[in-house]
Image (cartoon, helix red, strand yellow):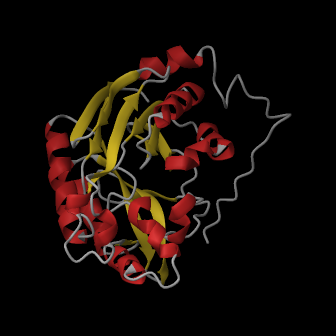
């Protein structure tokens, strides 16, 4: 990382379960961020086209729960095929606005479309898909929705902005997954999430201090009113206002906040990442450098694709 980088951390609501309209919103928000000088624009966990909240996803465990299978099918229809037209559209958004674009999506594999994945897609300013990471282990109710990820994308990649990579939500509690990023030299750490609890902020501070990297952590924001009228499990949203309240933030390598956390509303957080901060904070601690003992402790990453 050689120059100051302006990042945009987008806490915006998808057009829930509407693929094309959510992609349109990603385009308009990215245009706004690029106009504000952002070189990197990051959207939350499964922004396209909804995070399957436990408020309703718990119904998928019911063998004969009315509407459960239909709700899963609706989520699948609004997912992103990789490769596919929606993935290409995200690339076109990055290219049109000249930014690095990181987007959380519900992913389908066109060759085996029966299983969904929770994925982060990194598109370069020329529109190509530079990094593709699938969440390794879905959490709690998420195991009713997504399959397990694999070794793809479990690393940081060199970019003109710096070495960039990340993990999804509670993957950030997996020490070896974090260390895979550290060993690959991560400088801009993406921690996309749907965890809107107060305790999550302590996790972000720890990750920033342990990685000695900048942490960009967009969190999902969803209201029950945003669900379509024909959502098969709409009855479970009765009396619910906010499904996901956010908590997006951008942190410096010492764990201090550069922006956020933002709760209870849509918004785009901006911060300028100064590479000097990386050098300053790694003088005392560098998890994969002078504070590592590879002759005693080693990590092997199976980066094969399943």
Q: Which residue is drawn at 22% across and 77% down?
A: 230
Give how far across and how far down residue 241 sits, in percent. Answer: 25, 52
Q: Which residue is drawn at 31% across and 78% down?
A: 232
Q: Which residue is drawn at 16% across and 35% down?
A: 36
45 lies above or below 66: above
Point out the image quarter for the N terminus: top left
Q: Nearer the viewer, residue 263 or 97?
A: 263
Q: Which of 246 and 32 is in front in this view?
A: 246
**Is residue 121 at least partly visible in the picture?**
yes
Point out the image quarter for the C terminus: bottom right
Q: Which of 229 and 216 is in front in this view?
A: 229
Q: Is residue 260 left or right of residue 202?
A: left
214 lies above or below 164: above
Give how far across and how far down residue 40 sits, in percent. Answer: 31, 41
Q: Which residue is drawn at 14% across and 43% down?
A: 32
Give how far across and how far down residue 123 sits, in percent. Answer: 35, 55
Q: Is residue 281 left or right of residue 298?
A: left
The image shows a total of numbered marks equal to 0
143 lies above or below 261: below
């Amino acid at each position: 990382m050689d120059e100051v980088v302006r990042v945009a951390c987008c806490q915006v609501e998808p057009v829930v379960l509407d693929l094309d309209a959510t992609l349109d919103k990603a385009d308009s928000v990215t245009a706004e961020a690029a106009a504000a000088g952002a070189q990197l624009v990051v959207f939350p966990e499964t922004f396209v086209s909804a995070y399957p909240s436990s408020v309703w996803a718990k119904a998928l465990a019911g063998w004969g729960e009315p509407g459960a299978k239909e709700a899963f099918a609706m989520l699948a229809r609004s997912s992103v095929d990789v490769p596919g037209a929606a993935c290409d559209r995200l690339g076109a958004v990055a290219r049109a606005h000249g930014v690095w674009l990181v987007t959380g999506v519900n992913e389908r594999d066109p060759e085996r479309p029966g299983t969904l994945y929770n994925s982060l897609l990194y598109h370069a300013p020329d529109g190509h898909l530079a990094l593709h990471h699938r969440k390794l282990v879905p959490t709690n109710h998420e195991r009713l929705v997504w399959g397990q990820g694999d070794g793809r994308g479990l690393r940081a990649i060199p970019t003109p902005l710096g070495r960039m990579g990340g993990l999804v939500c509670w993957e950030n509690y997996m020490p070896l997954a974090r260390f895979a990023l550290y060993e690959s030299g991560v400088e801009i750490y993406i921690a996309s999430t749907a965890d809107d609890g107060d305790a999550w902020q302590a996790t972000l501070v720890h990750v920033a201090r342990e990685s000695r990297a900048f942490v960009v952590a967009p969190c999902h924001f969803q209201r029950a009113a945003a669900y379509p009228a024909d959502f098969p499990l709409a009855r479970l949203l009765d009396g619910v206002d906010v499904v996901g309240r956010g908590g997006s933030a951008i942190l410096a390598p010492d764990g201090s906040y550069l922006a956020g956390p933002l709760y209870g509303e849509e918004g785009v957080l901006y911060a300028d990442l100064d590479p000097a901060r990386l050098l300053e904070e790694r003088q005392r601690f560098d998890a994969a450098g002078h504070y590592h003992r590879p002759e005693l402790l080693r990590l092997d990453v199976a980066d094969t694709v399943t």
